[in-house]
Image (cartoon, coloured by chain):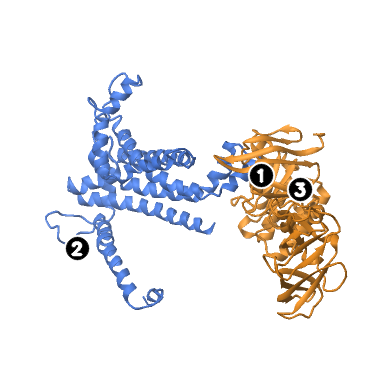
Chain colours: A orange, B blue
Amino acid sequence: MDQATHRIQIENLSKAYGPVQVLKDINISVPEGRFVALIGPSGCGKSTLLRTIAGLEKITGGTLRIDGQIVNDMPPRKRDVAMVFQSYALYPHMNIEKNMSYSLRLKRSAPEAIRQSIAGVAETLGLGHLLERMPRQLSGGQRQRVAMGRAIVRNPKVFLFDEPLSNLDAALRVHMRAEIRKLHHRLHATSVYVTHDQIEAMTMADHVVVLRAGQVEQQGAPLALYEKPANKFVAGFIGSPAMNFIEGVVGPDAQCVLFGGAARQQVELGRALPPGQPVWIGLRPEHLRLQGEGQSVQGVVDSVESTGSMTFIALNVDGAPQPLLVAHPGTVTAAMGDVLKLYIAPQQIHVFDKTTELAL
Amino acid sequence: MNKLLSRFPRENGFEITLAGFALLYLLLFAGLPLLYNIVLSFQQVDLMEPATLLRPFAGLANYRDVFSRPEAGQVLSNTLQFVGLSLLFQVVIGFLLAMLFLQDFPLATFMRGLFLAGWIMPGLVVGVIWKLLFAGDYGVLNHVLTQMGILHSKIFWLSDPQWSLYAVIIANVWLGVPFNMLLLSVGLAAIPADLYEAAELDGANAWQRFWGITLPMMKSTLGAVVSLGAIMTMQQFDLLAALTQGGPANSSQVAQYWSWQLSLQTFEVSAGSAVATLMMVLVLIVAVIYVRSTRNERMV
């Protein structure tokens, strides 16, 4: 692998606190200018992984390279990485200008050069009129911007984001999401972004890494994860609303899956699997239709929620641990207790091994 | 008075009674003596008639008398050294210990607890212990220092006028360090860890993080600690009583002890009251600084 084009290279990285292994055998490489999202449920180790890149946590195994250089034992201040903290971590005793210029002042840059780069970044982020203010006088969104500005001013090798939008309200979050994306488009800065919000990961990143219990479950382009999840966990984690699962068995003809207990149902897969194998079938809510062709699943309506543009119907189906959720565009007339038939194209049916949970 | 009463959310009398007891206590045992002391400092006091309130008005004569005494200059200089040096070392050592015990090492909390032992002991007991340590012929301090080769001849800490003030200051520093350490630990623990992490990523080394983050963030705590320490040092009495009683030859005499000696040993009550009133004004000034610095703390 050509190391020069990879800003960050993580090989077999592991991290343990005493006997507790929090990161296991992580391999990720981030090409220059790429935006990578680390995503997973809380406690999966995504923030710890980010902090090992920053140098705030020591790794206990493997190698970590930045710009081809091994940085395993390099202190954070020598790594030339900038981080935007979840809490923003603005220095409360410094005004916005001093906050943003702290690193440049430590480097003893020329005052005129500092003034110019602060002015430039402040302009970009719309902070020009706030430079004299103290952090406590700013709103959440403004603080978030200052935290980004403080990182941008440094022009570092790598930007690290630790759930930077989780303290903002929903509307502001959507707005800042677009803004960070635009900023990345313009600066082409290599970025690693930690989030638990899969929409953030899907919409912002070029490359998404899904973590669970300290291990990489799958990584790739956002749509690749959505279309070809490697296992049941990734399939359920990526996509909103989450994928529906039904327990079943591959039929004797090897082409279909049988499920539904007494009220036996079956779906054709259009491909062969070993007959008699226990499986999970995964159906995305947005792929299920009330009319159409292809395979069908039948169930009893449990609840109907309409938002105007979308209608969410939950159906009770035998073999599904949770009611099957359907996301249907427009309004649909259905009432509790109705029996509905849902259609799905065979190529949109995901199948996972019952025990290994790997995609088949 | 109505305004004061309206501050109580429910005027059922219970809260007022409770507050009343505290106020009455303060008024009787702190307010009246303070006032009486101020009054005394402007009067000509005749010990033949101690039980009278109306005495001849002396104007500023008592204050002039105090300042014209030969030992006044030395007492002033001693008091300034006693307060200044005690504060300096208490705060610096307390700060260093607070930072030390904030590090994560085995038994850190237990050892920090041990340091508080000195603080919970009465000043008089601490004085007696230090008297044993300081003793010229059989004292532990001299023994250790000569064994280590630092001293070649014994220092008579408490009876040598060159050393007596510093001996008292050393004991007072020891007595005040735990209190400083405790308050400063609380202040240090309140600084969010991510500020240090952000500064570290911004390129600050340990020294720069201390000057750039720790010290500015500790400003209000330090203000409070310094003012409280100043007040406590200016009130330090039992340690002096146990160690040197201001001697030898006033070499360790400080204002608060002098005031007591004047009033209650040589019975120059007017002069003693004048010194006490001057000290009170000083303490009041520091108290105002303290209140202001804690108010700032709340604003951040």
Q: Which of marks 2 and 3 is in front?
A: 3
Image coordinates for residue B218, horizontal then vertical, percent? 51, 47
Q: Which of marks 3 and 1 is in front?
A: 3
Q: Name the residue under label 2.
A: B54
| Viewer can see residue B244 | no
Image coordinates for residue A95, horizontal then vertical, percent? 64, 52
> Mark 2 Cα within 10 Å, few/some/many (few <14, many 20+)?
few
> Mark 3 Cα within 10 Å, few/some/many (few <14, many 20+)?
many
Q: What residue type is labelled 2?
A: Leu
Residue depicted at 67% across the width and 56% down the height: A143
- Relative vertical location of residue A348 with respect to residue A5 in this rendering, above or below: below
Where, by quadrant of the figure, is residue A139 drawn? bottom right
Badge 3 and badge 1 both on one subunit = yes
Badge 2 and badge 1 both on one subunit = no
Residue depicted at 70% across the width and 46% down the height: A216
The numbered disc on residue A49 is: 1
Where, by quadrant of the figure, is residue B173 drawn? top left
Q: Nearer the viewer, residue A325 or A115?
A: A325
Image coordinates for residue B2, horizontal then vertical, percent? 38, 77
User: Is B150 situated left or right of B54 in this image?
Assistant: right
| Between discs 3 and 1, the one toward the N terminus | 1
Q: Name the residue under label 3.
A: A219
